[in-house]
Image (cartoon, grey):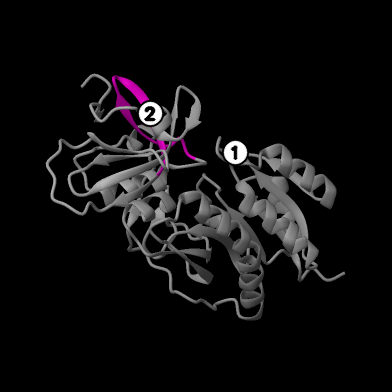
Amino acid sequence: MSTENHLIAIGRSRYLYDGIKYLQSKGYVFKAIVTEEAYEEYDVKHTDFELLARSLGCRFFMIKSLNNDELIQIVKSNHIRAAISANWKYTIPKSFLDLFACGILNFHLGNLPDYKGNATVNWTIINGEYEIYGNIHKMDPELDAGDVIARKSIPLRENTYIADVLQQAALDVPFLYEEALKRIFKQPDAFEVKGSLEGLRCYPRLPEDSRINWNETAETICRLIRASAHPYPGAFSYLNGEKVIIWKAAVFIPGERFLAVPGHVVAIQKDTKTIRIACRENFLEIQEIEYQGKVMAPAEFIKSIRVRFKNDANA
């Protein structure tokens, strides 16, 4: 029996899960699925991968190291030429990469060869980019340095939230895997963008990094809010010493010159139930907040313009 269409899958998240299911429907045969504990924001957990592996009749591995004798034997005995991956958080040794004649094809959101590493979607929105690419690239011993085999652009507009990007990427990734596999099986050295060791490196973001600094411009703060929204914990500030999460906002350009301390509530819009807050430049129109676990329109909570958001709970 031909092993031309045999694959293994390595990683976590819905990207990989949906990619496996789609490729299986297209005739690819998975001989193993390798995963690890999911991040809290992931809606697909290791138990979902275990059930998927069972339904496909393939081996399931819950391991941190790919230097696993049984897994390596599966690759060799089935003459597997390629693997797919997404969100695998551990180093992959060169000896394991070399098992695959056509490489391990990894999904990465970011404008490679820039935006390598962690929290790339968050950083891309914060940095004010106009698009972000979903890439299928060959894994390399160096971080995100392999050739890009297939990619698709996702536009970033002034009202694009991080959940919008993740949702679109989830729709795109199965087809990108298929495109990349077809390309490299036909020509193993094919690429769309040449990989590079050089490029902008992104490091992880922590929940406290989403604290709002009202001395920034309204546009900068709005990008932070959009980059920190669901499925992440949200951008936040303090009102009367208590934490308020700001889920939705937009830049508002006032029609007159103004003087106001950044963070001050300058208007309450009764028709839309929004509020406007002064920033270093322009206003931020706040559309949705969360206070003490309750999501609401801001005007349901804030009734006066004699209040001010602070950068710190103790300020």
Residue 11 location (% of width, % of height)? 61, 48
Magenta span of residues: 232-248
Residue 245 sits inside the magenta stretch: yes
The quadrant in which the C terminus is found is top left
Looking at the image, the residue that sits furthest to the right is 1
Q: Which mark is residue 38?
A: 1
Q: Residues within 10 Å of mark 2 (few under 14, many from 20)?
A: many
Q: What amino acid does circle 1 point to?
A: Ala
Q: Which residue is mark 2?
A: 244
Closer to the chain start, of discs 1 and 2, is: 1
Above or below for 298 versus 106: above
* Relative horizontal placement of residue 237, taking residue 81 as reference (left or right): left
Q: What amino acid does circle 2 point to?
A: Val
| Secondary structure of residue under mark 2 | strand
Q: Is residue 93 visible?
A: no
- For the stretch drawn in magenta, the main secondary structure is strand
Q: Which one is in front, 48 or 196?
A: 48
Above or below for 312 versus 234: above
